[in-house]
Amino acid sequence: MKTELRVFSGSQFVGKPALVDVEFIPFLQKVNDFAAEQLLQVHVTSSARQQGVAVGNTIVPPATRSNHLTGHAIDMNVIHDGQLFNSSALKKSNHAKLPAQVRKFIQAIRDEKELRWGGDFGTQDPVHVDDGLNIRDALAWDMKFPIIQAALIALTRPEAEAGQARLLFLERPFISGPDVFAVQERLVALGFAMNPDGIFGVVTDRALTTFQEREGLIADGIVGSSTRKALKLT
């Protein structure tokens, strides 16, 4: 068993960074492939979560042993032809009204034996997709939980305390620290308007995404190794 917090980047994935356990990535690749087949985009709204941190706009109250806590779940909206389909649109009672491509995408997830669609839960959660780790392998869930939680906590700590360069991106609660300040200073030096405060907020996210587009990088709003190099921070 391997456990490591990673960011999944798929051709059809947009929205928030998909922070997941490395062993969940093959399942997200399947979701990405299903979306590509139907010319859809997967708009991520939530992925790995810190235990005890309030989550806004959740459809269903977080479970005590949620797969989000081990990086084995995402919440998503679906975008088809420029239109976003959220939890209200994706619930079972509305499926007859959905475009055929969206219906086929959801059905592909349901037909994949290693994936679960939250719309099939007793309490519907139609934006949720996971691999059922908490049920099919409770021991693995228990072993992964402290590792993923420690990695998530490290994301909110200053770089020196975490001991290594951390991923920086727009998240709630906001990521802050001297490493964020350094990114902001570089962006200002490159002509972006902002007031460096060491807090990775919306303005920083927009400036960073624009910078990434300009540099030919993946415009995901994440400060990883490639973006650090482009910013000359390494």
Image (cartoon, rainbow, N blue to C red):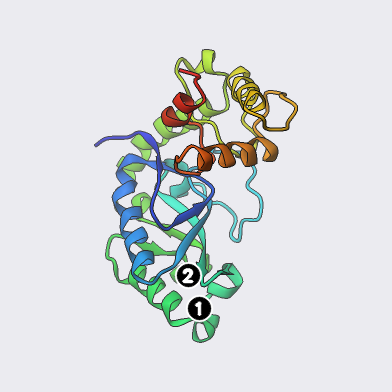
Residue 205, above or below 59: above
Residue 38, above or below 161: below
User: How many residues crowd mark 1 within 10 Å: few (<14), some (14–19), many (20+)?
Assistant: some
Residue identified by numbered label 2: 119
Dot 1 lies on which element?
Answer: helix
Q: Which mark is residue 92?
A: 1
User: How many residues crowd mark 2 within 10 Å: few (<14), some (14–19), many (20+)?
Assistant: some
On the picture, is 160 further left or further right than 24? right
- Kindly give the residue lying farthest to the bottom in the view shown: 96
Q: Nearer the viewer, residue 138 or 154?
A: 154
Q: Nearer the viewer, residue 23 or 222?
A: 222
Residue displayed at 58% across by 41% down: 210
Looking at marks 2 and 1 on the same chain, the residue that comes earlier in the sequence is marked by: 1
Q: Quadrant of the N terminus?
A: top left
Locate residue 17, reporting x and y percent: 50, 44
Locate residue 154, reporting x and y percent: 51, 25
Residue 65 at least partly seen: no
Residue 213 at least partly seen: yes
Dot 2 lies on which element?
Answer: helix
Query: From mark 2 to mark 1, how far is it between C-alphas?
Result: 7 Å
Residue displayed at 50% across by 78% down: 92
Q: Quadrant of residue 145?
A: top left
On the picture, is 25 further left or further right than 158? left
Locate residue 105, reporting x and y percent: 39, 71
The amino acid beneath tag 2 is Gly
Q: Contact (CB < 8 A) between labels 2 and 1? A: yes
Q: Nearer the viewer, residue 223 or 233?
A: 233
- Kindly give the residue lying farthest to the left in the view shown: 1
Residue 203, above or below 112: above
